[in-house]
Image (spheres, rainbow, N blue to C red):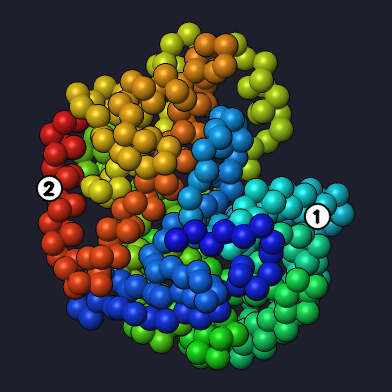
Amino acid sequence: MNAHSTEKGSEHILRSVTVKNTDDSIAGLGGRVLGVRVSSSVSFETPIRPITSEEITSKSYLGYRGELQGQMAALPLYMGGQIFERFMKNNGTVKRIRDDLISHASSTFYLINYPILQMPPVAAGEKAEKIAYELQCYAPMLDYVTMPPLECNADIFEKRILNWCESADSIEDGRGCVPQLSFTEEPELFESKLKKIANLSKTGCINVVNIQYASPLTHPHQYAALWSMRDDLQALINCSAVPPKENELVPGMSYDMETQLLRYGIDSISRKKYPIPPKFIAKRNMEPPPSDLDNIDSFDYAVHPASIRIDSNKWMSMPHDTDCNCTVCRGRTRDELVDAFGYDDVGNISRSGLRYFSKMHDQQSDILELTSIRKYISSNNMRDYEERIKEEQSKYANAI
């Protein structure tokens, strides 16, 4: 169910989050299902896939008029590298980031939304933390303000969360607070901070948490800590900056990360936002359209029922269609999708059209698959789901 409303306020803050089902096996194939109540008439279950800035940008570029479905919106703001340095020194940079946030928040006003601050850790109680708060405070149409990642011990972290919660609630429209952690934090510190969040989640103070991605292969202790607390964390856990794919299954076909992450108790994922230099955009706008589809931007096509991603050149040459019924594909054949998104309004080949299409398809088709996953988790049949995935993977590997 979509949490739609034409006004921000009481129906755009999560009122309660309850752990409904967890996979008790050490394999943890099913992760967990949360019951989330927004109001007396609006509720949903996890896992979910939030709309992000990537899909909003893609929709705008393509002039796509269809509605993108979802329960929540996670809005990544890139604030790393040189942008972070300018953010710390330049008022104009802060304004540009705020304007970007206002634009994306306005595009997702009908959803429960929150920013994700992609920035380096900052000292608790210092200038950067204050600027990050003010940046969001003056952005209307936001339901939550998000804490920057903080360099501090667990006790100070808890105090800062309480400070942010009180401050967010005092904003005119009354907002929630999203704490941020990173899987790259030292294992002991990560676990201590997570325990603080678990305790606060039981009071209702915290109901959304963002954790910045790092690979489970290189950070097993942090993921094990999250897994061990999946029954205690009464908050929706989003993992941000998740790469679309990992190891290749066969050339041109790679595993999708999401299914693996759900096993640890993660309830939603969002992709990383990458900055696009203005000079690159200007150069692109001066280039003539590609002469053929072989020269368009590369992309990969998500096949969530198989938990894979297919490289664009393989997808374009596959002998059969992928039969996707998401709100973007709508059951159309590959050739129909290429005609719809691979050309501009005057019939020229679009360099980026299919790449932007693939981003919208990734998120919207994932919503369909997560509906199926929730049923498998709730019925404790995730092993059957794993078998289904293997069969689908084998089918596509043979086709490629």
Q: Which residue appears at 40% of the width and 16% of the height?
A: 294
Looking at the picture, how far across and down is residue 263, in whole percent? 30, 68
Q: In the rendered view, does 322 fall on the left or right side of 366?
A: left
Q: Look at label 1 and name its amino acid.
A: Val
Q: Which residue is mark 1?
A: 94
Numbered circles on residues, count: 2
Q: Is residue 276 above or below residue 81?
A: above
Looking at the picture, how far across and down is residue 127, in whole percent? 81, 71
Q: Residue furthest front?
A: 41
- Of discs 2 and 1, which sits in the foreground? 2
Q: Is residue 271 visible?
A: no
Q: In the rendered view, does 362 fall on the left or right side of 148?
A: left
Looking at the picture, how far across and down is residue 10, in whole percent? 65, 73
Q: Which residue appears at 26% of the width and 35% of the height?
A: 323
- Which numbered disc covers residue 391? 2
Q: Is residue 138 visible?
A: yes
How packed mark 1 is, by other alpha carbons closer than 10 Å (few <14, some 14-19, many 20 or more), is many
